Image (tube, grey):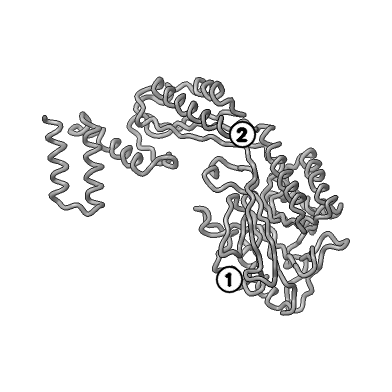
Amino acid sequence: MHMADTHLGFRQYGHTEREWDFDDAFRWAIDQAVAKQVDFVLLAGDLFQSGSNLQAITFNNTVTRLEVLQEAGIPCLVIEGNHDLPRYRAYRTRFGWMNALAETNRLVYLLDVLYATPLDAGVEPLLACDGHHIGHCAEPIPGVRVYGIGFNGAATRTVLERFERFIAEQPADGPNYTILMSHAGVDGRTRERTSSNVSLSGLRGLRPRIDYVALGHYHMKFSEDNWLFNPGSLELTSQDLAHEEPGGVFLVTVDTEAEPKHRVDHLECPRRPFVHKAFSLARTNGPEELYGEIEAFLIGERAKRDLEDDVKQPVLSIALVGASRFEPGLVDSHRIEELGRGILDPLLCRVSNRALPPGTAAFDEIEDMSRRDLEEQVLEGMLESHPDFGKDLTHWTNATLEVMEASLEKGTADDICNILGDTRAALTG
Ligand SMILES: [Mn+2]
């Protein structure tokens, strides 16, 4: 089983229940591992939300969960993610939480091969398992070898290049199945492009020797070429990721005689539901109309919820966005919260009023708008202030949209003249 980014101890929105949600998710994953009788578990970093501010209860609960694996005889191999780093490291050692858990036999901690020893030709990697709980690689079952490379920040690329040279020098009659577990992002998976990312092309050199790349770091689920796998965070760590496929665990079945050597199934982690909706104030005439829209939306959501048997109350978040037609400060957020609580009975209800005063074009609030709505809003903003168009704003906005569409669809000049003529005729009667 391959999992990552459990972020234990994350008290999201300052809510204690959310902290237990992350614990529930971890317990679910461990129960799956035991129920499916997996040979071993890979935990690709970010076991904890905050290694620098780890609470005793989080550490204790984690130990309790890991002991379930231990009792079932399932080794758990781990690397250190950026969130796992302790506040201080003892001088010249890298002693952190993973060491602490490894020294008490709860985990097998894989240190970067490149750390302790300069990776020159002929270096023997230190093998963990069978009493040693810290090493550069481990063979949790015969014929399967797992290397670990934790979070390396800006050095990620260099470290992987060195690892590629190292692995190429290993004897060819090595293990039957080799896994590289690493905590790094992948280029192209989010809008950001950081130095701690890897690129698929940059990893190509590892392909002849590595059968499975077990990643963690990014919180959405993805895989590439049936070779590189990222399971996604178990619980939802950010509202921004709510539209992504939910994370969970990969169950990997290996048959080295077959081609390909593995079959990989993803199990989705049961999560607390999130209900999020952005309301644009650009097409609402006043607060009362807005409350009505929100109420209708919430009633619709409740109807959907009644059909599902979610045990957990949802997290509800309502955002007010767009360039408002009225003073956005007139909206009573408490009233919206009361509507939310009364209709959906959520765990918590977050209302954020990010709407802009009339006459401002709101370019930052476009995430939840369709292209058509956005274009309409921008055009309205431009035409509104013009003396010739402001009076019949809706007409001219629609006409402009039609002209845009006609030109995009390679309409002729005559088509465009006809649209303008029809608009004028409609206005002058
Ligand atoms: Mn993470």
Camera-side residue: 36 or 337? 36
Camera-side residue: 102 or 142? 142
Which quadrant is the N terminus positioned in? bottom right
Snapshot quadrant of residue 26: top right
Label 2: which residue? 309
Label 1: which residue? 204
Q: In this rendering, which labeled residue sits more in front, label 2 or label 1?
A: 2
Instruction: Check disc 1: other Cα within 10 Å, few if <14, some if 14-19, many if 20+.
Output: few
Amino acid on which the number 1 mark rests in the picture? Arg
Residue located at (74% from left, 79% from top): 173
Residue located at (38% from left, 38% from top): 362
Residue 87 visible in image? no
Secondary structure under tag 2 reads loop
Question: Against 52, is 390 above or below?
Answer: above
Camera-side residue: 330 or 47? 47
Percent of width and height locating residue 46: 69, 50
Percent of width and height locating residue 31: 75, 46
Amino acid on which the number 2 mark rests in the picture? Asp
Q: Along the polypeptide, which appears first: circle 2 or circle 1?
A: 1
Question: Against 358, is 75 above or below?
Answer: below
Percent of width and height locating residue 344: 55, 26
Any atom of ligand 1 within 8 Å of the CB at mark 2? Answer: no
Any atom of ligand 1 within 8 Å of the CB at mark 1? Answer: no
Secondary structure under tag 1 reads helix
Q: Is residue 40 left or right of residue 153?
A: right
